[in-house]
């Protein structure tokens, strides 16, 4: 610690910190808070080489040519979210009713997360328990929480139960671990067939918006207008069939006061690209050579039809894959050009003046060391676990080659066949395990994974590293039947391990709710108590 502290403070303001995946545990928010405050101690915010706030994207949807998200008859979202995010328990009917009756309002029936905007781990269990309410229909789009969400196996039974989730519609290009339980599966596109305009996820110092558009035509079935069936085209057709505002003729607003149609996804996205092209100083026109080199020749008639005189500028955006501010706009001398201009609070008053919905205690308004893992009621998970038997701590990290979309890639499997379970040589010796052994890793509540172990010194003794990226149970890994036709499982897609299978249900919450950070609700996919057992040697 002394060595790192000396190094960190030896470069003036040109030092910064980062924390992300390691904070995904029950007390991770305060760990991240503490790490972020190291930057405040050396005064690095807004300085070159220090902590930055990204400048944000070019706005593709509300721009100089169109306001694509505003339309007559638009209904604003309102009320409480199913995952109880972004809402204080103290503002709920439950709290107010208890107070009016002279009752202690704590604990609430379950956790509330006023500082978060979305909690993936909570929505199925919340609906199943009717708190704050139950869903009548669930629609997922290219979503697979049964694979990607820690401990989701605890709520699979709710997806199967029509009394808990009456209607489940999955829009997905695959029959995956989640969509396999849907009442209906609608097709969706994959990477090279999709539209989009989005900003990179942090870690950049200039304005950027990247785009995507179909490089190949989707093989999906088509609507009568010739458009392939996928999420956006389905929602457009559904909106038109229901006569909803914002679809069909005169749906999109232009800055010129005119309205424009929305019948197909390109009606929306090519106009979004035009907003990008015309923002700030408009981009130059694409040359004929640009168009040919970028493979845009076949797009020209459609660009002319939708973007009019600006079609070559839209072609420039498409040929570059987005809109990018010049690199030299990142810095202003020794400062960053895009600065965080608000006061930096070491003490967070809003956090420190808000009470936990379960314990009734105020959150800490400063960084604080809290020994985890803990349950929602503040009790230590270790009080419910035999620490002598489950003496190891499991954590996950992403594979450098494989990821969940790669399960079907034969070429990548030629590079790396599987994902593995990693332990230190001291841990291996303690449990009689050797490199290449087949082992079973179990949590205290009955979940387990089986995989091949690697012994390496880059893992802390007493911990188990789970290489994440495979461990699939669907998307070709299981046998399915479509119209009585058998599609047999492909064993190679079953290789590898998935740490989310070890996710733990919170003993202090209603059934199905997993361990999360007690402030933010972020899933606790790390710091999982486990044991390891050798099954057999594969040598």
Image: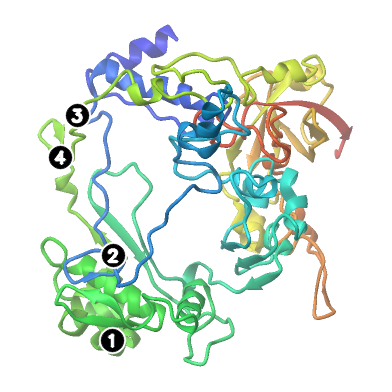
In which image quadrant can residue 180 be found? bottom right
Which residue is label 1 attached to? 300
Q: Residue at x 45, y 35 (%)?
A: 91
Callout 1 crowding tier (Cα within 10 Å): few <14, some 14–19, many ≥20: few
| Label located before the other in sequence (3 or 2) | 3
Q: Secondary structure at mark 1?
A: helix
Q: Residue at x 73, y 38 (%)?
A: 511
Q: Which scheme is used to colour this image of the protein?
A: rainbow
Which residue is label 3 attached to? 47
Mark nearest the camera among 4 and 2 is 2
Q: Residue at x 41, y 7 (%)?
A: 2
Numbered tag placed on residue 61 in the rendering: 2
Which residue is label 4 attached to? 337
Viewport quadrant of the N terminus = top left
Which x, y percent locates residue 294? 32, 75
Q: Secondary structure at mark 3?
A: loop
In which image quadrant can residue 297 be found? bottom left
Dots 4, 3 in contact, CB < 8 A: no
């Amino acid at each position: 610690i002394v060595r790192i502290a000396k190094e960190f403070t030896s470069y003036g303001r040109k030092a910064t910190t980062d924390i992300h995946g390691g904070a995904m545990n029950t007390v991770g928010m305060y760990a991240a808070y503490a790490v972020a405050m190291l930057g405040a101690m050396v005064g690095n915010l807004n300085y070159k080489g220090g902590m930055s706030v990204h400048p944000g994207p070019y706005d593709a949807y509300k721009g100089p040519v169109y306001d694509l998200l505003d339309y007559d008859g638009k209904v604003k979202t309102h009320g409480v979210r199913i995952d109880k995010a972004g809402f204080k328990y103290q503002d709920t009917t439950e709290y107010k009713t208890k107070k009016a009756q002279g009752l202690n309002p704590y604990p609430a029936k379950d956790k509330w997360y006023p500082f978060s905007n979305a909690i993936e781990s909570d929505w199925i269990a919340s609906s199943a328990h009717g708190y704050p309410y139950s869903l009548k229909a669930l629609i997922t789009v290219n979503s697979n929480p049964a694979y990607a969400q820690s401990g989701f196996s605890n709520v699979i039974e709710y997806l199967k139960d029509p009394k808990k989730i009456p209607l489940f519609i999955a829009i997905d290009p695959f029959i995956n671990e989640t969509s396999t339980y849907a009442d209906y599966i609608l097709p969706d596109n994959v990477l090279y067939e999709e539209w989009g305009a989005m900003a990179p996820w942090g870690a950049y110092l200039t304005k950027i918006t990247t785009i995507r558009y179909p490089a190949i035509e989707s093989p999906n079935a088509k609507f009568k207008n010739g458009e392939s069936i996928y999420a956006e085209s389905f929602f457009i057709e559904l909106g038109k069939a229901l006569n909803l505002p914002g679809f069909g003729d005169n749906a999109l607003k232009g800055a010129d006061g005119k309205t424009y149609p929305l019948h197909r996804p390109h009606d929306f996205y090519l106009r979004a690209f035009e907003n990008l092209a015309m923002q700030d100083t408009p981009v130059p026109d694409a040359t004929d050579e640009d168009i040919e080199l970028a493979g845009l020749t076949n797009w020209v008639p459609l660009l002319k039809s939708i973007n009019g005189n600006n079609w070559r500028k839209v072609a420039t955006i498409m040929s570059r894959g987005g809109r990018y501010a010049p690199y030299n706009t990142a810095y202003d001398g020794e400062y960053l050009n895009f600065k965080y201009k608000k006061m930096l609070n070491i003490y967070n008053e809003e956090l420190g003046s808000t009470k936990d919905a379960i314990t009734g205690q105020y959150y800490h308004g400063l960084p604080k060391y809290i020994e985890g893992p803990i349950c929602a009621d503040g009790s230590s998970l270790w009080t419910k676990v035999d620490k002598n038997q489950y003496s190891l701590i499991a954590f996950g990290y992403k594979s450098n080659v494989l990821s969940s979309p790669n399960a079907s890639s034969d070429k990548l499997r030629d590079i790396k066949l599987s994902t593995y379970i990693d332990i230190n040589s001291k841990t291996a010796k303690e449990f009689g395990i050797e490199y290449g052994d087949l082992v079973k890793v179990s949590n205290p509540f009955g979940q387990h994974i089986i995989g091949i172990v690697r012994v390496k010194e880059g893992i802390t003794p007493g911990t188990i590293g789970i290489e994440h990226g495979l461990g699939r149970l669907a998307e070709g890994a299981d046998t399915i039947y479509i119209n009585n036709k058998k599609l047999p499982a492909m064993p190679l897609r079953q290789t590898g391990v998935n740490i989310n299978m070890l996710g733990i249900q919170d003993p202090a919450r209603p059934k199905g709710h997993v361990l999360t950070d007690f402030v933010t609700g972020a899933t606790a996919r790390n710091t999982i108590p486990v044991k390891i057992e050798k099954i057999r040697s594969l040598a």
